[in-house]
Image: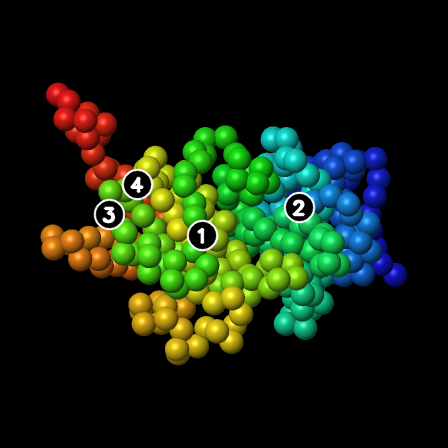
Amino acid sequence: MASLQSSPTTTLNLSSAHATTLSDSDFVILTSFDATQTFLKTLDSPIFLLFTCGTSPDTGQVWSPTCAAASAAVVAAYQSISPPHRLAMVQVGTSQEDGDKSPFRTDFDIFLHDIPSLMRYERNNQGYANTSFVLEGKSVGNAALVEFALTEGRSTGVRKKAVDTIRDYASFRTMAKLFEDTAPTYLLFLSGSWPYNNRVWCASCRYREAVVEYAFQKYAAPNAKLIKVIVAQIPAEWNKHNPYKKLNVPHVPYMLVPHLDAFEMLFYQTYRGELDDVQMLQAMFERDAAFQPAASDVLGLN
C-alpha cells in the first residue's frame, strides 16, 4: 500500500544528530513511489521535492550520512526563510532499492540521478511536470545553495546579473563576431530540453546549472555576463558533426571564458574545475572581478 505520513506536526528523525519538526500544512513525507505519484497528481501549484534515503531496517536511521546532513540543511533553510512553495520529503527506500531500476530513476519527469536531490516540481497542461533549481549530492548540504533554490534564485545577498541564452549556432557566431571583451563573460554549454517537460536531457547539466548560476550571481563582477549556450536540442544532434565539437567543446556541461588577444583575435580559456564546486567557481569569478577597473579609472577620474 502507498504510504503517506501526515499529522499535525511531522517529526523528521534524520539521524541521531539531526531531528526537527515542521508544520504539516507546509510539509509532507512520502515513503514510496506510488505514494509520491498519487500525491503529485493532486497538485495545482509548484512544490519543492527533497529526495533522500529511506531508513535502514536494522538501525532505524537513514543509511547515508550525506542524506542526513542534506535533509537537515534543507529543513533548516526551509524554516529560516519564507519559500514560495511547500516542501515534500520523498524517501526512496533502502540502499538496495535505490538502484538503476528504481522507478524514481526511470520516471520521465523526476528522472532521479542521485540522492539526496532537491528540485522544484510543477505539473504542466500536457500531463507532464517541469522541474528546475535541481541540486544533488553535496550541493544539497550547502545552506546558501539550498536557500537559492528554495527562493527560486531570489535569496538574500545574491545580486541579479545578466544571464542570456543562445539556442542556435548562427546566434553564437554573431555573438562571437561582436564580442568586445569589455566585461567578464562566461559561456556555459548545456544540452537542450525535452519539449514535454522542459527537462534537459543531459543529467549532469540538470544539477550543475543552478550551482553555476548561484556562484555567478553571488561572486562575479557586477557587470559580468553568463551566456547559456544550447549545443543540441535532442541527443541525436550531439554528434561528431555538431558545430560546437569544432569549438573543442567535448561534452556538456562545459564552460569557456572568451577573451580578445593583443591583435583583437577571439580565443577561449577553459574552466578546469568541477561545475558543481562552488569554491572553485567562486575563485574564478572573484579573480576576474578583481581585474575589473574601478569606476574612477573608467571615467578617467583621480
Q: CA distance from mark 2 to mark 1?
A: 25 Å
* SS type, badge 3: loop
Between marks 4 and 3 in the image, the one whose residue lies nearer the viewer: 3
Instruction: Say if 236 sits above or below 136 in the image.
Output: below
Residue farthest toward the bottom in the current orientation of the protein: 240
Q: In the rendered view, does 183 fall on the left or right side of 9? A: left
Residue 180 badge = 3
- Place of residue 236 in the rendered image (x, y in percent of width and height, measured from the top left): 51, 76
- Residue at image x 62%, y 62%? 195
- Between the residue at mark 1 and the residue at mark 4, the CA separation in whole angstroms equals 23 Å
- State the separation of the CA atoms marked 2 and 4: 31 Å
Is residue 12 shown to the viewer in this render? no
Identify residue for label 1: 165
- Residue visible at 64% across and 40% down in the picture: 75
Locate the C terminus by quadrant: top left
The quarter of the picture where residue 285 lies is: top left
Which residue carries the number 2 mark? 48
